[in-house]
Amino acid sequence: MGSSPHDQSSLAEKNQQYWDNVSKSIFKEQWIQDLQQQIFSHLRSNLTWLSIDASATENKKPTKMLDYACGNGIPSKALSPYFTTCIGMDMAQSMVETYNAAAKELGLSSRQMYAIRGDLMAENVDPALLGEEMSGFDLVVICLALHHIEDSGEAIERLVERLRVGGTMLVIDWATIEEKGRGQQGEVGVEERDGEESGHRQQGAGHYHHHHNHQYPHDLREINHPAAHTVAHNSFAKEQMAQAFESAGCGDFEFVLHEKPSSVPMIAGGQMQLFFAKGSKIRA
């Protein structure tokens, strides 16, 4: 499912080196902060959609989530109140340190939220990542990292392997469209499930208008940006995600667009569109 001229090992090395070098500066950029706030707010507003029980945590069975290619852990920050344990994993050691610093800022113990260095996409995965601690997750999230992985289908398959049966796989990334539903009396995203389209309510009632999907006029791999060489995919279509989730053993696939486009200042047009794709693991 990849289109990058780089083989996966060299692409992984480029990503590790780049993100190790920028971890201290990247999250200070305003457009990154705005983008992360979009993701944080969307996750917090859609707990039921994510099959997350937001009731009091007392007397609930332990739950855990994996935040893969975690960076500074925006999904974990948003969802940590609803999980016993949030585990981040990143191939860049400096990102692991950034995630652990974020956990400390939240006042969470190292048992509640912590990150480790690891690469589940490696040809030979570290045996230390194959134990019970790194399996049986209730939720696995990969946020704005799938487009940096050459074989996105295999990546989703490997991440789904880490779920318990019935657990939720969530991909957050860029959708292959330029236009989207527009809320009129409150924001409403566009939800597509099993080939159908419906209003996905975010904050109250509203309406939307659907526009035809079409490709971006740019290629993230060719833009004038220091991270361009780390990108394998420009964006993903709903059909790509649906096929990947099905092949990985997930059912109940749903694909939702964020209600607002995201500012990405270095690309033509200055905007891209986030999607949230989820499915439930249906077989061991």
Image (spheres, rainbow, N blue to C red):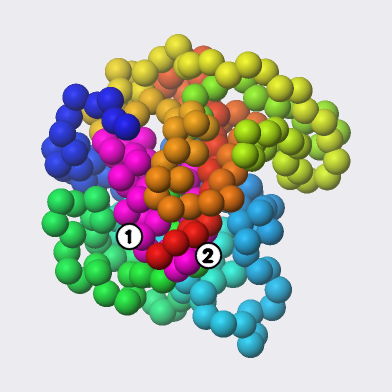
Which residue bears the numbered disc 1? Answer: 89
Estimate the x, y position of residue 75 in percent, counting from the top left: 50, 55
The one of 130 and 44 positioned closer to us in this rendering: 130
The one of 183 and 107 positioned closer to us in this rendering: 183
Estimate the x, y position of residue 204 in percent, counting from the top left: 83, 45
| Secondary element at image label 2 | strand
The residue depicted at 41 percent of the width and 71 percent of the height is: 136
The answer to whether 277 is drawn above or below residue 221 in the figure is: below
Q: Is residue 183 left or right of residue 43?
A: right
Give the quadrant of the N terminus: top left
Q: Quadrant of residue 263?
A: top right
Give the quadrant of the C terminus: bottom left
As drawn, the residue found furthest toward the bottom would be 59
Numbered disc in front, either 1 or 2: 2
Badge 2 local density, few (<14 within 10 Å), some, or many (20+)? some
| Number of numbered labels in the structure image | 2
Q: Is residue 66 visible?
A: yes
Q: Between disc 1 and disc 2, whose residue precedes?
A: 1
Residue at mark 1 to residue at mark 2: CA–CA distance: 22 Å
Which residue bears the numbered disc 2? Answer: 166
Q: Is residue 108 visible?
A: no
Q: Amino acid type of disc 1? A: Met
The answer to whether 118 is drawn above or below residue 148 in the figure is: below
The residue depicted at 24 percent of the width and 50 percent of the height is: 121
Q: Amino acid type of disc 2? A: Gly
| Residue extent of the magenta highlight | 144-172
Q: Quadrant of residue 79?
A: bottom right
Q: Is residue 41 magenta?
A: no
The residue depicted at 53 percent of the width and 15 percent of the height is: 214
Estimate the x, y position of residue 103 in percent, counting from the top left: 44, 67
The residue depicted at 20 percent of the width and 71 percent of the height is: 128
